[in-house]
Amino acid sequence: MFEVQGLNAGYGQVQVLWDVSLRVEQGEIVSVLGPNGAGKSTLLRTALGMLRPMGTDKANSITYRNQRIDGLKPEQIVRLGIALITEERHLFPDMTVLDNLKMGSYIRRAKEKRAESLGLIFNLFPRLEERKNQMAKTLSGGERQMLAIGRALMSKPDLLMIDEPSIGLQPLLIAKIFDTIKEIREKGVTILMVEQNVYFTLEISHRAYVLENGKIVMEGTGKALLDNSHIKKAYLAM
Amino acid sequence: MTKNFGNLIALQDVDVVLRKGEILGMIGPNGSGKTTLFNVISGIYAPLSGEIRFQGQAITNKKPHMICRLGIARTFQIVQPFGQMNLLENVLIGSMYGRGMSIEAGRNKAEEVLYFVGLKDKMYLTANEVTTEDRRRLELARALATEPQIILLDEIMAGLTPAEIEEALKLLYEVNRRGISIFMVEHIMKAVMTISTRIIVLNYGQKIAEGSPKEMAENPEVIKAYLGDRYV
């Protein structure tokens, strides 16, 4: 469904990603693990067209449903059915929860289904319905996370990319957010995520990649990686 | 301490004591008032009622820059660097502002702190050019550059890997060893349970528990409101 081949990317003269390849099949939850500064967020930003790949077109390719999407602008990529939740979330603080959600549904594929999407999101996050008329800036950390996920789902994506879904959440909510991701996937949305909570991530991931110093150093099923000695030592502190 | 936002009571009758040399942890659900408490202590919000004393002196309603100069520094959960300025300049503001220090002395202090947090090699990069983790270290560096006696840390370990958490803990032990008392909000249990000498727990703006890390991890009310039964 989604494939990255030989991707090089970075900022200015500084190259962050080196020859990165990965694929996501329809219906999968795929995760990218790795230390801070390894290039995980850069990978997602490049995939969504917020950052152009470095070097020649031949070296880099990003394809989605057999169509090259590297070189497209983010708004074009979103229209194809990919959404990204950035680590900063970028909510509209002075707009209500409801208006933030609506902002996610201005593309054609989503507009007609706005009412249906809202129903689905309120079903997933009853808290957002309770707070729909409240300004986004008054939400707590957990509620902001819900709103960012909700707004992304409003665009009716087939592939949802999430940067650090559990960051800043209390322990009780961390378990819940991973349950929610599983539920979203069961509703037919394919997931590519970057996460630091390696234990919960690998438990729900079909497959995962490990990115260190800008290179993919390991790949495997969630189960296999949970048993891997390098993962245990570096990421699970066991 | 009580603090309201309009009709909403964000903090209700909260008592906290931080002893000299202590590492006090604060946990509680998202939205329970932890950052608000830091905002009141650091002078960003005035409380509705209550008093804050530092070394016997009342500091309630003092301006944030005054409180910082008295010796209480803080970091922000959502990092607040001057993006277009380099790391050295960012830290210089912390070391020099309001102290009448020479540029040379301020710079020496700033460089020492940047070295201490591991950012010396990057000090000529702008804050916008470094990673999220480096920006969080920069928050700590700016706070330390003010030479505080107390430092308030708001989730400085969010998003770190276990190996990075180990590094951050070492850094905090060293900060504490230099005589700085620490009051920290942290959701990463591995970190807060390890380093804290004592922990307080907030829920819906009230302090619901206080004690050793072990006592808090076994407290049924804390498990129900905050930890859940599946945390790792």
Image (cartoon, rainbow, N blue to C red):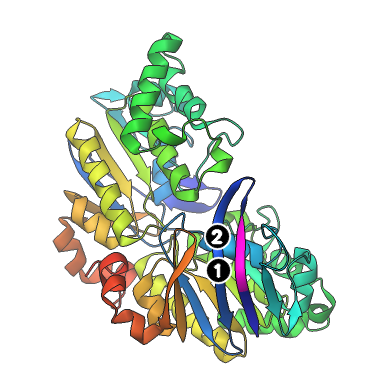
**Which amino acid, mark 2?**
Leu
Q: Residue at x 82, y 78 (%)?
A: A111
Give the Cα separation between the discs numbered 2 and 1: 6 Å
- Residue B1 showing in the rendered view: no
Q: Which mark is residue A17?
A: 2
B164 horizontally vs A123: left or right: left
Q: Give the dominant element type of the magenta stretch: helix, strand or loop.
A: strand
B38 horizontally vs A40: left or right: left
Q: Are marks 2 and 1 in contact (CB under 8 Å)?
A: yes
Q: Which mark is residue A193?
A: none
- Report if residue A6 lies within the magenta region: yes
Local crowd size for mark 2, using a 10 Å CA cut-off: few (<14), some (14–19), many (≥20): many
**Which amino acid, mark 1?**
Val
- Residue B214 showing in the rendered view: yes
SS label for mark 1: strand
- Report if residue B157 lies within the magenta region: no
Q: Which residue is mark 1?
A: A20
Residue A150 lies, in percent from the top left, at 63, 73
Q: Residue at x 29, y 42 (%)?
A: B183
**A128, above or below B149, in the image:** below
Q: Residue at x 20, y 30 (%)?
A: B178
The chain identifier of the residue carrying mark 1 reads: A
Q: Between residues A152 and A75, which one lies in front from this camera angle? A: A75
Q: Which residues are magenta?
A: A5-9
